[in-house]
Amino acid sequence: MSVAKKEYKRVTVKSLIEMKQNGEKISMLTSYDYSMAKIVDAANVDVILVGDSASNVIAGHETTLPITLDQMIYHASSVVRAAKRALVVVDIPFGSYQSDSKEALRSAIRIMKESGAHAVKVEGGSEIKESVKRIIGAGIPVMGHLGLTPQSIYKFGTYTVRAKEEQEAQKLKEDAKMLEKLGCFGIVLEKIPAKLAKEVAESVSIPIIGIGAGNGVDGQVLVVHDLLGMTHEFNPRFLRRYMNLYEEMSNAISQYVGDVKSKDFPNEEEQY
């Protein structure tokens, strides 16, 4: 049963758990720069994810793998300076935590100290248990990520829906409970069957944030460039576009070019 919505001046990991307990859905969006983060934060988004998806939408790479720890810290620093209300969570990039728990801790510490972020996010379950344990043991909040894990794309070989088979679904459920037990404050579930995602959300006390995981979870996350329609080649079923900025921006820029060429810009009132 839901209760009256509580207003949060600053969202914390504790706030997110309270939201789940109160039946309030959690909103989460990506941001990678100061200007965008300022708009997202002012719209009362609960969590801003500085995602390694910056590798795709900002740098133009095919996967999330090329982005470096230094680049993630740069993006995170810009977002933190803009965020006055939202909890800022930062992806630890590929190769910075998977194989060595000590390196994982060093990476997490660098993100927290150098960017001022509030938490980190890692992909995987039992495979990264020691890394998660060590980071949380140092007092750093950790969000998990299960299902389709883009940093493992070359292992999967495809971006199709994960955990449709019973064996993989069972492992995902076990990994979610393990992450909760280790102390993670939340988990992102990406591109898995809605029924499975709902089961996971009901089986743990920490918030489950979905992307392509149906509406039975505790919150939703999207890439802000996709939501605003700045990207137009990417059209998964789970994406709802709230604007078509690609078309609007293209038209505006074309008009600017035309005005410059025709000597209409700048006019008498637009010069000194």
Image (cartoon, rainbow, N blue to C red):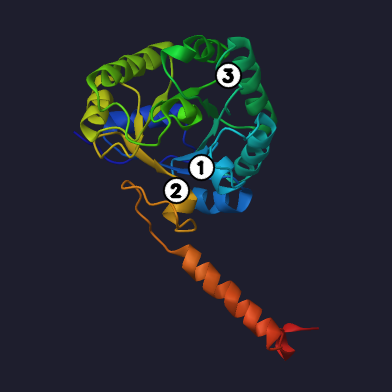
Residue at mark 1: 85
Q: Amino acid at mark 2?
A: Asn
Please give the name of the residue rendered at 65% of the width and 32% of the height, measured from the top-left corner: 68
Q: Quadrant of residue 232?
A: bottom left
Q: Is residue 11 above or below residue 237?
A: above
Q: CA distance from mark 1 to mark 2?
A: 7 Å
Q: Is residue 4 above or below residue 249?
A: above
Q: Which quadrant would the C terminus be assigned to in this image?
A: bottom right
69 or 163, nearer to the observer: 163
39 or 5, nearer to the observer: 39
Left or right: 178 as drawn, with respect to 224: left
Q: Quadrant of residue 100?
A: top right
Q: CA distance from mark 1 to mark 3?
A: 28 Å
Which numbered dot is residue 44? 2
9 or 235, nearer to the observer: 235
Expressed as whole percent of the image width and height from the top left, the position of residue 256 reads 63, 78
Q: Is residue 269 above or below residue 132?
A: below
Q: Which quadrant would the N terminus be assigned to in this image?
A: top left
Residue at mark 3: 97
Which residue is at the far front? 157
As helix, strand or loop, the secondary structure at mark 2 comes to loop
Q: State if disc 2 and disc 1 touch (CB < 8 Å).
A: yes
